[in-house]
Amino acid sequence: MNRTAGQPTGQPGNGRGGSGNRPGRDDSPDRLYTLTGGRSRSAPDSPFDLVTLVVAECDPAPGMQSEHAAILRLTERPMAVVEVAAMLRLPVGITRVLLSDLLAAGRVSARHPRRTAVTDPDILEQVLVGLRNL
């Protein structure tokens, strides 16, 4: 096949439109595959959704995978999974796999944020009245 001028060459940044550097999208699939050991999803019983709060239970250890170490540094204080993914500039799915590894090793803990249920009927009535007045 002969290429003519202006055809995409398959090189990063060519033929993609717009400027590059989209987190997790311009990364080499090989790199993402290597990060997770070939896994594309975390275990079905994984506790991680987008808002799960993750907290490090230990400091990074020497020789640890750099992404695991970065997660432990980021989660010294509770941080949501989606925030961890954004800070690492990785897709959420890949981040979940890495978090599952750390959870299995006991290096992080995960918990869902508390949801305060509004059960007071007077408050609900006030909200309803306020919405009707809009």
Image (spheres, grey):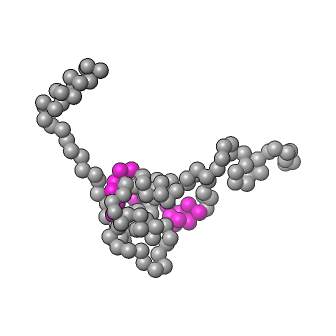
Q: Considering only vertical position in the picture, is 2 above or below 35?
A: above
Q: Which residues are magenta?
A: 31-55
Residue 87 part of the magenta-drawn span: no
Q: In the visual, does 39 lie left or right of 19?
A: left
Q: In the visual, does 123 lie left or right of 6?
A: left
Q: Position of residue 66 (x, y in %)?
A: 50, 70
Residue sitting at x 60%, y 57%: 27
Residue sitting at x 86%, y 45%: 4
Image quadrant of residue 11?
Answer: bottom right
Q: Is residue 28 visible to us here?
A: yes
Q: Considering only vertical position in the picture, is 60 above or below 29?
A: below
Dividing the image into 4 quarters, which one contains the C terminus? top left
Residue sitting at x 80%, y 45%: 7
Q: In the visual, does 126 lie left or right of 47?
A: left
Q: Considering only vertical position in the picture, is 121 above or below 7?
A: above
Observer-nearest residue: 35 or 117?
Answer: 117
Q: Is residue 104 visible to us here?
A: no
Q: Residue most toward the bottom?
A: 62
Q: Residue most toward the top?
A: 133
Q: Position of residue 18 (x, y in %)?
A: 66, 43
Image quadrant of residue 52?
Answer: bottom left
Residue 32 part of the magenta-drawn span: yes
Q: Considering only vertical position in the picture, is 38 above or below 19?
A: below
Observer-nearest residue: 40 or 75?
Answer: 75
Q: Position of residue 103 (x, y in %)?
A: 35, 66
The overriding secondary structure of the stretch rendered in magenta is loop
Q: Position of residue 24 (x, y in %)?
A: 55, 54
Q: How many dots with numbers?
A: 0
